[in-house]
Image (cartoon, coloured by chain):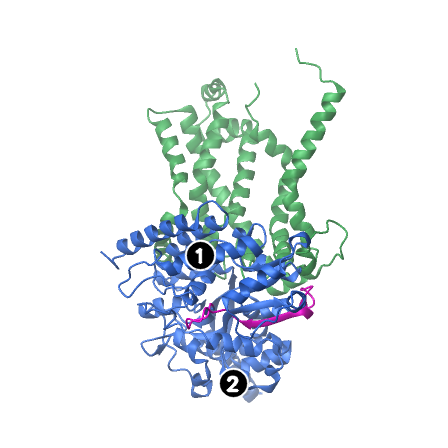
Amino acid sequence: MGTRFAATLASAFLASTALAQAQTITIATVNNGDMIRMQALSEHFTDANPGIELDWVVLEENILRQRVTTDIATRGGQYDVMTIGTYEVPIWGGQDWLVSLNDLPADYDVDDIIPAIRAGLTVDGELYAAPFYGESSMVMYRTDLMEAAGLEMPEAPTWDFIAEAARAMTDRDNEIYGICLRGKAGWGENMAFLTATANSFGARWFDENWQPQFDSEAWATTLNFYLDLMEDAGPPGSSGNGFNENLALFQTGKCGMWIDATVAASFVTNPTDSTVADHVGFALAPDNGLGPRGNWLWAWSLAVPAGTQNAEAAKAFIAWATSKEYLELVAENEGWSNVPPGTRMSLYENPNYAEVPFAQITLDSINSADPTNPTVDPVPYVGVQFVAIPEFQGLATAVGQQFAAALAGQVSAEQALQSAQTLAVREMTRAGYID
Amino acid sequence: MARAVTPQRRAVNTAAAWTIALLIFFPILWTILTSFKTEAEAIASPPSFLFFDWTLENYVTVNERSDYFLHFMNSVVISLGSTLIGLAIAIPAAWSMAFVPGRRTKDVLLWMLSTKMLPPVGVLIPIYLIFRDLNLLDTRIGLIIVLTLINLPIIIWMLYTYFKEIPVDILEAARMDGASLRSEILYVLTPMAVPGIASTMLLNVILAWNEAFWTLNLTAADAAPLTAFIAGFSSPEGLFYARLSAASTMAIAPILILGWFSQKQLVRGLTFGAVK
């Protein structure tokens, strides 16, 4: 009796100690399909790690960005794991705002991460975030409309072909527009597309001395090409169209082509939501024969803010959520087409994943983007569709408003570029990059 | 003498009132209808108004993913807490400004209103730092303090306007009968100003319920109210309009029902003193 009582007391003590030692980590993430799946599957992690509990904060992308930026800049300590992108990592890592992930366990196999993605998350040899899913951009097109136009999409089209095909596919009487492109102002909206496009036209944001380059011939060619194409083959009101608006247009059969994030491939080929699911083809983003293609590179990644009290538990969670085993767990529960793409080489060597129609094109798109050498002429910055400096968000949104105004016909391309140059010179001077 | 209203004119007025009311209500109605559609139907072109396959799937998904009750309780505590504390401060403040005005009363009133002109983001970092140091981040009490302070000018202004309509002679009579200051405010002024206080209270609850800057920026997992609940279902990369509509409907339903049942009180309070 006495022994049993002592044993009960001991187990009660141990249980209370375990409870007392249980750590709660708060994870801030965005409302994307892959993240929601991670939240749903996270009980597998807590089952395997009974000492760790998870609190989730899921927010819209822009709200989340503002929220975590405030918290990390003030060392507020509200979050233990943050979902951030390839734009934030070089800046925050350089400021020592993030905990290095170089000491993840050996079986994590960090060398399996796709090199282009890993490069975007590494600062001075330190990996500051682990990629949860990676994306680039590519051409999604209607195979039936392309055939009806008597054209065949090459695997790696040029901008000239895209323009020709867009005009040939346009049938305004039946509300079919040859091409749908982002027009909504914002550094992550129209400027993501236009910056990547400009790279392929030989334009760049700044020269090696941080002098803004919107007065260059290459930018004039880029913007005029975009405006002419949208006028001839774009949907009405395209200056208000972002990812979601174009997705809705494409899914309801109103776009011949759409150049946007590779993650859209799973949406447009899903017969539950897309009326054109059986008629979708993919191709690499276009180029102009100058080297860079007009595609971007982005990775939603998990990072640990410096100053957290739960760094080890946070790292354990990140190691689980970005592991090879997690990819298999998703495949087991949701199917291979729902596995977070673009992070690990081994995924693309998996024969099961090779059957997913957009798997190879996603990898090829990611591999064709180089964040450390994104333009034809040399630049002093990192980033394909962004410039990894803190001033970029505000500046690019202001420039994006000028370009959206040009698309809406409120100003000419020349005026928009002139305003963009003035804005950029003023901001870069104020920030001390140039005199 | 009041002008006679002809039946035709009454019909026109009624039709116009209904049209305007429906126009104002339409976005809410559309949100509610979309919440019962599938994601494909939510973006269908042309959109279907009533003839679609009604589904509760979005509500099930929203409830599976988020703790609605926690967010709801946070909204209730924060909005009621900030309103009650606000009223406790504002009633004596408005009383003194209405019945014992000083030389600078008007200036003080204007100064209070001017604090509402500052964009909130301008003071986000200082307030965030203060909250961090006082351990008030992601707490209900922290949000109650902030919402009390940001809505206080409006409460004082509204109550001041109502109190100014009450004849000062009545209060003087009470004083002559030996009423203390506390009794004067509690037993004479407050009962007479009940419609005004009630409408101020309702308006403040609505403002606090819908506040979406501080409630998003100062909370994380524990104290997040329904504004954060909605923000969790909005996505720039993915069409989840039906799900977002379901979350929005669940978030606005309580305040909509409150407004519906108390509209008589609200209108009476808002028009208090407008017609003499």
State yes or no: residue A287 in magenta. yes
Mark 1 Cα within 10 Å, few/some/many (few <14, many 20+)? many
Residue drawn where x is 32% and y is 58% of the image: A212
- The mark found on residue A223 in the picture is 1
Chain under disc 2: A
The answer to which of A160 and A204 lies nearer the viewer is: A160
Mark 2 Cα within 10 Å, few/some/many (few <14, many 20+)? few
Where residue A220 appears, x then y in whole percent? 40, 56
Which chain is in blue here? A
Instruction: Residue A310: tell me if it is visible.
Output: yes
Instruction: Kindly indicate the quadrant of the structure image that contains residue B192.
Output: top right
Residue A47 lies left or right of residue A292; in this view the side is right
Question: Which residues fall within the magenta stretch?
Answer: A271-294
Cα distance between the residues tagged 1 and 2: 39 Å
* Residues at marks 1 and 2 touching, judged by CB atoms closer than 8 Å: no
Residue drawn where x is 63% and y is 43% of the image: B258
Q: Which residue is mark 2?
A: A346
Asked if badge 1 and badge 2 are on a common chain, one would say yes
Instruction: Kindly indicate the quadrant of the structure image that contains residue A197.
Output: bottom left
Residue drawn where x is 65% and y is 40% of the image: B260
Q: Colour of chain B?
A: green
**Element under label 1?**
helix
Q: Amino acid at mark 1?
A: Leu
Q: Amino acid at mark 2?
A: Ser
Where residue B29 appears, x then y in whole percent? 67, 46
Give the quadrant of the N terminus of chain B: top right
Q: Please report whichever mark, 1 or 2, sits nearer to the chain's N-terminal start.
A: 1
Q: Main secondary structure of the magenta part?
A: loop
Q: Nearer the viewer, mark 1 or mark 2?
A: 1
